[in-house]
Image (spheres, helix red, strand yellow):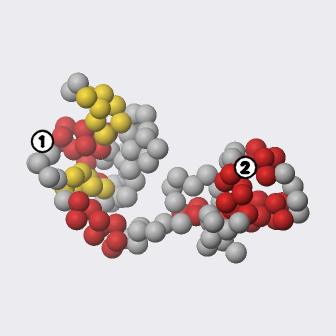
């Protein structure tokens, strides 16, 4: 497969590029599809073979229904991506272990959170094993 081409558009929280085009906001990968292949038929989605939301390489894009997109996700084992394998994770497994150790030693959760760029509520959820439950 050819390399990914990442959009230069601003990214959404889920990693998709998005910019105004044709008088409304468009996802960058959808715009790339239209520019390369023409209109997107009603009821179809522009999906990624590469599973990289910021990629706009037309060779990595394909049309599919929501069901096709879900089946593709399942086939690639991306249904329940946990921890640092999640592309939006702010912490690594090792950082989670350190947070738990520091919290167990009685260190202030706000101070721990500040060191890792997360809130004291996130530290509390990690400490109580409500988040990052897969990390031992």
Residue 22 in view here: yes
Q: Which marked residue is nearer to the observer: mark 1 or mark 2?
A: 2
Q: Residue at x 21, y 44 (%)?
A: 33
- Side (left or right) of 116 relative to 111: left
- Residues 19 and 102: in front is 102
Q: Residue at x 73, y 63 (%)?
A: 127
Q: CA distance from mark 1 to mark 2?
A: 47 Å
Callout 1–callout 2 Cβ contact below 8 Å: no
Q: Position of residue 112 (x, y in %)?
A: 79, 51
Quarter of the image containing the C terminus? bottom right
Rendered position, 61 above or below 75 = above
Q: Which residue is mark 2?
A: 120
Residue 76's quadrant in the figure?
bottom left
- Residues 17 and 49: in front is 17
Q: Earlier in the sequence, mark 1 or mark 2?
A: 1
Q: Residue at x 59, y 61 (%)?
A: 84
Residue 23's quadrant in the figure?
top left
Quarter of the image containing the N terminus? bottom left
Q: Position of residue 93 (x, y in %)?
A: 67, 64
Task: Judge the density around disc 2: few (<14), some (14-19), many (≥20) Cα neighbours within 10 Å.
Answer: some
Q: Residue at x 72, y 57 (%)?
A: 124
Task: Judge the density around disc 1: few (<14), some (14-19), many (≥20) Cα neighbours within 10 Å.
Answer: few
- Side (left or right) of 9 relative to 81: left
Specify the farthest residue to the top. Answer: 23
Rendered position, 101 above or below 121 = below
- In the rendering, which numbered label is found on residue 134? none
Q: Which residue is mark 1?
A: 39
Q: Position of residue 120 (x, y in %)?
A: 72, 49
SS under mark 1: loop
Residue 94 in view here: no
Rendered position, 46 above or below 11 = below
SS under mark 2: helix
């Amino acid at each position: 497969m050819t390399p990914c081409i990442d959009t230069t558009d601003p990214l959404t929280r889920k990693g998709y590029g998005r910019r105004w085009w044709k008088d409304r906001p468009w996802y960058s990968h959808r715009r790339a599809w239209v520019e390369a292949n023409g209109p997107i038929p009603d009821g179809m989605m522009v999906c990624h073979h590469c599973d990289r939301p910021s990629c706009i390489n037309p060779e990595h894009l394909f049309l599919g229904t929501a069901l096709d997109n879900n089946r593709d996700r399942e086939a690639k084992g991306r249904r329940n991506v946990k921890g640092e394998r999640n592309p939006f994770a702010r912490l690594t497994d090792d950082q989670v272990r350190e947070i738990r150790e520091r919290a167990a030693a009685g260190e202030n959760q706000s101070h721990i959170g500040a060191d890792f760029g997360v809130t004291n509520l996130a530290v509390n959820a990690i400490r109580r094993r409500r988040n990052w439950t897969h990390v031992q």
